[in-house]
Image (spheres, grey):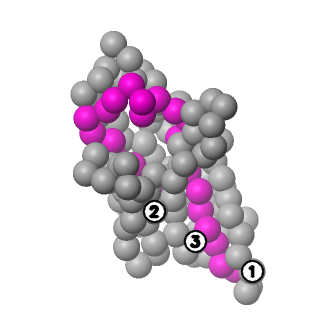
Amino acid sequence: QVQLVESGGGLVQPGGSLRLSCAASGRIFSIQSVSWYRQVTGQQRELVATITSGGTTNYGDSEKGRFTVTRDNAKNTWYLQINSLKPEDTAVYYCNAYTQDMGAGMDYWGKGTLVTVSS
């Protein structure tokens, strides 16, 4: 199993920046990719960014240029940097890990961290 804990959310003014963290523990070697999703109350969860174990990154169309996903292998932590924050970025941000272990694929989720963009 893999456990994920997000942190770094909070209240930020429009135009500001945040760096969200996703700390992983457990069978980390099985992680194939880590993705960041966000969800506004009453709406579907939306994919923001993905980084694979090989370092390849992909972003949702609406987030290109403002979002950057990175990882620190030594700390078993993945990050989502968000710049030029807008009120519409307000959401709960979730970390997802896709794993392959003993031939089986599985998704793990953190509990999320709330980002509120408001003046």
Residue drawn at point x = 42 percent, y = 30 percent: 88
Left/right of residue 5 with respect to residue 117 in the rendered view: right
Q: Nearer the viewer, mark 1 or mark 3?
A: 1
Crowding near the residue tagged with mark 2, few <14, some 14–19, many ≥20 C-alpha atoms within 10 Å: many
Helix, strand or loop under label 3: strand
What amino acid type should be assigned to the residue bearing mark 3?
Answer: Ile
Residue drawn at point x = 31 percent, y = 32 percent: 85
Q: Which residues are magenta?
A: 76-101
Helix, strand or loop under label 2: strand
What amino acid type should be assigned to the residue bearing mark 2?
Answer: Thr
* Residue 45 seen from this side: yes
Quick one: label 3 or label 2, which is nearer the N terminus?
A: 3
Residue 19 image point, x, y percent = 36, 41
Q: Quick check: 12 above or below 93?
A: above
Q: Quick check: 114 above or below 20?
A: above
Left/right of residue 97 with respect to residue 106 in the rendered view: left
